[in-house]
Amino acid sequence: MKTEKIYSAGIDIGTSTTKMVVSSFLLKNVAGVTHVPRIEIIEKTVLHQSPIIKTPFINKEIIDMEKIEQFIFQQYQLAQIAPADISTGAIIITGESATKENASEVVHAIADTAGHFLVATAGPDLEGIIAAKGAGTLQQSKNTAKVIANIDIGGGTANIAVMQFGEVIGTCTLHVGGRLIEFHNGIVQSISPPIMKLMEKWSNPLKVGDTAEDARVTQLIQEMAATLAMTLSGQLTDEEHPLLLGHLPIWDKPVEAVVFSGGVAACIYEKDCTKRQYDDIGERLAKNLLQHEQLQSFLWLKPEETARATVTGAGTQITEISGATIQVDADVLPLKNVPVFNCYMDTDKNKFDYTIKTAVERADALFSTQENRSPFALYFSQLPYLSFQDVHTLSKAILQHLATRSSKEIPIIIVIQSDYAKVIGQTIQALNPTVHIICIDQIKVETGDYIDIGEVLPSGVVPVVVKTLAFHSK
């Protein structure tokens, strides 16, 4: 029952700002001596929150990696923690920063030198989920049972994650942010490409050199707010809308409540917004959102974190270690940092094939890049009672949609909360002995978690570490 302290760091390199949080977690084995170890966090402490700095760029397309590294190591010194002491954490590059020429180089270089990190990059969907956890909205959805949308508005994007009962049910990202129009000395200095595209049909569009008080600036801000309101109300159906980044909204329940996080949210919830140091539309956008009639139809809830929601969500915690592994291919182990996607199985058993097909497509879109297909774990939640025939049907569906991508580098990884892993794993192996498969059970995870799967122990047990993106209250 001894305790162990580990250190975690979260680093967020965003469109407008870069920030960092260093935390400590006190771990304890809460299981009995004769039971499989179960490690839980019994205490968490924020040791250091960095100032929020403007993300440094060499030019419009290249992030200044040297300045980022200087900032990070300075924060370690202030926290009195050495990079080698960091056991876990996340470095994420978000918003428009993720599209820069050297984005991948930056995160991997920092991950190699600044500690042991969980996430290298986060696309807009995953960023929205991380921010929702950091803002405390995921927990609020558990407490209230309401369908809540967390809207994380930074410099370049608004990342929306909709959740209910503590589960993410949909995401969407818009080009709505504080730095899409920037000023200098009261004059428009820059206009982002999505805003230029939005004005293509205007007879007299706003242009660089116009005054910051130009009525067209207000009109553009109003269009951003209106597009956000349409999205939350289920009225955005135009796949080619200039402010839509990626896919249309994918939640199927009406949003009841909203929570705002990100830099713009600081101006929504905090009365004094004069501390902002950036010359852009952020403050005016916040004011317009507050006054927008359609947005007022939702219940407004307060976040636990605003500007630091994403970076606090990016710290990680080890929440569970389980030895309940039933069917594994020892040759592919160990595996580290495998993202989890929740595949809801509370459906007609005749629809198992469609459910798994849809989950695989969504997980691929969430975790893979154009260059690389990444391994992920499918978590079968709310699995009904299964007869032998049901197990056979489910196993065939898994093979149908995952066997062709199976390899030593990308095995089939199935996680089940109920006690079906052994029979499902054995059935899959009987149907196709050549596939690489890991099937584990008695574990509770959710979309946005990551798992480490260790090597097979002499007892035949495989340890599984579930890492959950942590969040901290102020």
Image (cartoon, rainbow, N blue to C red):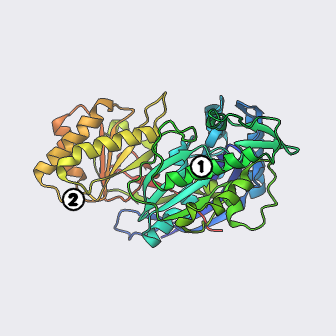
Q: Amino acid at mark 2?
A: Pro
On residue 158, which mark appears? 1
Q: In what element is the residue under mark 1?
A: strand
Q: Nearer the viewer, residue 325 or 444?
A: 444
Mark 1: few/some/many CA within 10 Å (<14, 14-19, 20+): many
- Left or right, 140 with respect to 10, comes to left
Question: Is residue 286 visible in this depiction of the protein?
Answer: yes
Q: What residue lies at 79% left-to-right and 56% top-to-bottom?
A: 276
Q: Amino acid at mark 1?
A: Ala
How far, Cα to Cα, is label 2 from label 1?
Answer: 37 Å
Q: In what element is the residue under mark 2?
A: loop
Which residue has dot 2 on it? 384
Expressed as whole percent of the image width and height from the top left, the position of residue 357 reads 29, 40
Q: Nearer the viewer, residue 200 or 71?
A: 200
Task: Report the mark closest to the observer, 2 or 1.
Answer: 1
Q: Nearer the viewer, residue 170 or 446?
A: 170
